[in-house]
Image (cartoon, rainbow, N blue to C red):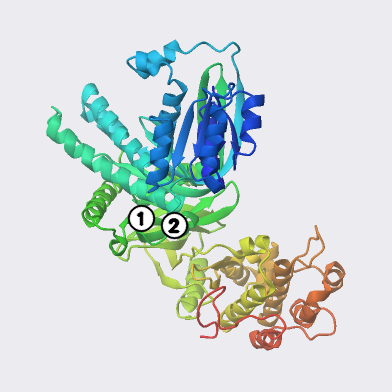
């Protein structure tokens, strides 16, 4: 552990230098200018000073002159950091310290190598290598142990070698070792070239972190995704090299998978005695790990979370979309497949590399669709299902042209699944009802109600692709919605105009469903999802409860069944009352901790409302939806829309909009 002072005017560069040196165990003090440096090094002697040559007003070399003129700091080793293209500063720095000048852009490996060289400058000329230098370093008088923990924003890349077991069975031990050493050496070079650093590397894969640093011309997510493509390309090149140079008759292809996610990362350095072990942790790291597992189940090579893809920009070629359920936090995030580089963003000389990377990803994706060392369906269940599953939960339904991926929910007679429609290459939500377990009348009525929805063409109602049956089950194929849930919007406290926009869209959905003589009767925010364009979509219709109540009205004992027995007028009214409660939740005007549902009396709802003066103009609309006050209760969409349109002058919103952006709401 060395004491190092950094003098760097750029805050981002200063933090980057400080983090990487601290994770190596050094004690670092970082300042923006040279005003405090003399006092720092005189009061607490340092072992190295890293000085940027672009200090304001020529302060760099004035500071060096002051350090050299003082007997206590005259021999302090210096390391200069020179901006790119500044030849005058480089010449002056090398005149002072011939071996102590670094040019930007930097990476972690170059920085640590230069720091090590400057710390041992007094003995490097007399020893043949760094190992000997380390042996000659005096033992510290006092061994130090401790933990350094910091939180940083960055992007995590996790790479997994998916078919390590297959490789081990097919290759001799020496051949496999040589092949893996070359592969991981190339992976480390790819990450370092993009300004990242490898946190962990083992036979099964590696984890790398990308953050703000010297390469400020590109976002760290861009560099992480480019590294993922470089790793897939490296796997192909290493296999070609092994086939040409190693002695085994056949070298199997290497199947790799990558997950990329951006967010807050906990960086820790645990120092025990003279050893220092940097590592990263936190939800971002865990999500990157789960992204790779999700990519394997989908047959992808590289899976990037929505936030990371948005920050990475248009340099890459994005393909299929899906979602990843974070069951621990109760959220769902969009993910996207990366299939290569965008040729339109090629720099001079990059087209050949981009073409090769595209071919490597396509070849790797073919391998990814195979079972490999672990069956993708088993991997996905490990992530998505609880440990205690009901008997028979492992049996996936068999449907023509569809590959079932995983179960979402299990009801009384029905189950909901996510599946891939193979001919159309799209993901679908499949609702199934077993012929052996459900009464024939239930199956007939259940499918008949969804058949009515299949004929409905309304953009705020989920699309029903197909209704059918085979020898063992009836099924309904629905649209997958990847834009998030309304419950997430409630937690985030959306603007008033956007909340009114959502209510208008939900009113149109109810109007279309009610025209088919379908009413929910137990509607809640959880029954609305978003498309990725921002359109609010009704995705649940309480059909199971409705059918049970139609078949056994006298036995409708559960709350949902009892609601389904009600006539259409009562059902419509309850649905619009539910919209009123959703609007109150979006605006946050219910008393904290208040438990309000559709059976709460109007008097109690009125008592629990906390309406700030700035939104009192919304009171007639809220009262009409909830059925309180003097306003006649709403039970039709046109009543809601007329009331909302009158508010546009006060709370601007575009009723033709899909959400924050988009086209026609009234289409």
**Residue drawn at the location 45% of the way across and 49% of the way down:** 220
CB of mark 1 within 8 Å of CB of mark 2? yes
Within 10 Å of disc 1 (Cα), the crowding (few <14, some 14-19, many 20+) is many
Within 10 Å of disc 2 (Cα), the crowding (few <14, some 14-19, many 20+) is many
Which residue is identified by label 2? 309
Residue 406 x, y percent position in the rendering: 45, 52
How far apart in space, not on screen, are marks 1 and 2 (Cα)? 9 Å
Pick the residue in front: 344 or 29: 29
Pick the residue in front: 246 or 314: 314
Quick check: can you spot residue 623? no
**Residue drawn at the location 37% of the way across and 52% of the way down:** 298
- Point out which mark residue 599 bears: none
Residue 532 x, y percent position in the rendering: 49, 67
Disc on the earlier residue, 1 or 2: 2
- Point out which mark residue 338 bears: 1
Residue 518 x, y percent position in the rendering: 59, 77
């Amino acid at each position: 552990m060395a004491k190092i002072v950094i003098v760097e005017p750029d805050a981002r560069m200063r933090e980057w230098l400080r983090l990487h040196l601290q994770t190596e165990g050094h004690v670092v003090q970082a300042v923006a200018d040279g005003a405090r440096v003399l006092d720092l090094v005189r009061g607490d002697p340092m072992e190295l000073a890293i000085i940027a040559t672009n200090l304001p007003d020529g302060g760099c070399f004035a500071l060096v002159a002051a350090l050299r003129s003082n007997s206590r700091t005259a021999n302090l080793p210096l390391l200069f950091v020179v901006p790119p293209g500044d030849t005058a500063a480089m010449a002056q720095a090398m005149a002072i310290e011939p071996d102590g000048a670094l040019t930007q852009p930097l990476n972690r490996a170059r920085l640590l190598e230069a720091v090590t060289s400057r710390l041992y400058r007094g003995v490097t000329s007399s020893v043949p290598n760094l190992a000997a230098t380390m042996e000659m370093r005096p033992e510290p008088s006092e061994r130090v142990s401790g933990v350094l923990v910091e939180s940083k924003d960055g992007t995590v890349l996790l790479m997994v070698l998916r078919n390590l077991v297959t490789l081990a069975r097919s290759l001799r031990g020496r051949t496999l070792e040589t092949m893996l050493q070359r592969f991981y050496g190339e992976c480390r070079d790819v990450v370092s070239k993009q300004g990242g650093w490898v946190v962990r590397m083992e036979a099964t894969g590696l984890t790398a972190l990308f953050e703000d640093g010297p390469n400020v011309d590109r976002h760290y997510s861009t560099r992480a995704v480019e590294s993922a493509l470089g790793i897939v390309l490296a796997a192909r090149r290493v296999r070609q090299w092994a086939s040409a140079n190693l002695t085994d008759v056949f070298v199997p292809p290497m199947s790799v998978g990558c997950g990329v996610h951006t967010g807050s990362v906990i960086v820790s350095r645990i120092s025990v005695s003279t050893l220092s072990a940097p590592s990263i942790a936190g939800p971002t790291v865990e999500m990157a790990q789960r992204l790779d597992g999700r990519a394997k189940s989908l047959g992808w090579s590289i899976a990037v979370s929505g936030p990371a893809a948005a920050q990475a920009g248009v340099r890459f070629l994005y393909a299929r979309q899906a979602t990843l359920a974070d069951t621990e936090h109760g959220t769902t995030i969009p993910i996207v497949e990366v299939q290569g580089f965008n040729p339109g963003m090629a720099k001079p000389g990059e087209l050949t590399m981009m073409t090769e990377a595209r071919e490597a990803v396509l070849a790797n994706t073919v391998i990814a669709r195979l079972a490999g060392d672990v069956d993708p369906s088993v991997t996905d269940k490990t992530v998505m299902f609880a440990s205690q599953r009901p008997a028979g939960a492992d049996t996936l339904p068999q449907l023509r042209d569809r590959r079932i991926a995983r179960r979402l929910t299990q009801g009384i007679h029905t189950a909901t699944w996510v599946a891939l429609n193979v001919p159309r290459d799209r993901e679908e939500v499949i609702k199934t009802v077993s012929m052996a377990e459900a009464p024939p009348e239930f199956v007939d009525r259940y499918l008949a109600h969804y058949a009515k929805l299949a004929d409905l063409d309304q953009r705020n109602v989920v699309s029903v692709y197909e209704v059918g049956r085979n020898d063992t089950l009836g099924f309904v194929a629905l649209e997958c919605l990847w834009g998030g849930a309304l419950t997430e919007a409630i937690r985030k406290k959306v603007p008033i105009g956007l909340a009114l926009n959502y209510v208008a869209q939900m009113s149109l959905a109810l109007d279309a469903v009610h025209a088919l003589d379908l009413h929910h009767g137990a509607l809640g925010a959880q029954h609305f999802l978003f498309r990725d364009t921002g359109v609010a979509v009704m995705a649940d219709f309480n059909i199971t409860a409705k059918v049970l109540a139609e078949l056994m009205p006298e036995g409708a004992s559960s709350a949902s069944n009892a609601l389904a027995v009600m006539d259409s007028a009562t059902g419509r009214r309850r649905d619009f009352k539910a919209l009123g409660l959703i609007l109150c939740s979006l605006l946050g005007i219910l008393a904290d901790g208040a438990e309000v549902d559709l059976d709460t009396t109007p008097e109690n709802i009125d008592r629990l409302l906390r309406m700030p003066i700035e939104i009192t103009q919304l009171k007639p609309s809220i009262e009409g939806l909830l059925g309180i006050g003097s306003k006649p209760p709403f039970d039709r969409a046109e009543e809601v829309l007329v009331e909302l349109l009158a508010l546009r002058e006060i709370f601007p919103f575009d009723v033709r909009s899909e959400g924050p952006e988009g086209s026609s709401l009234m289409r």
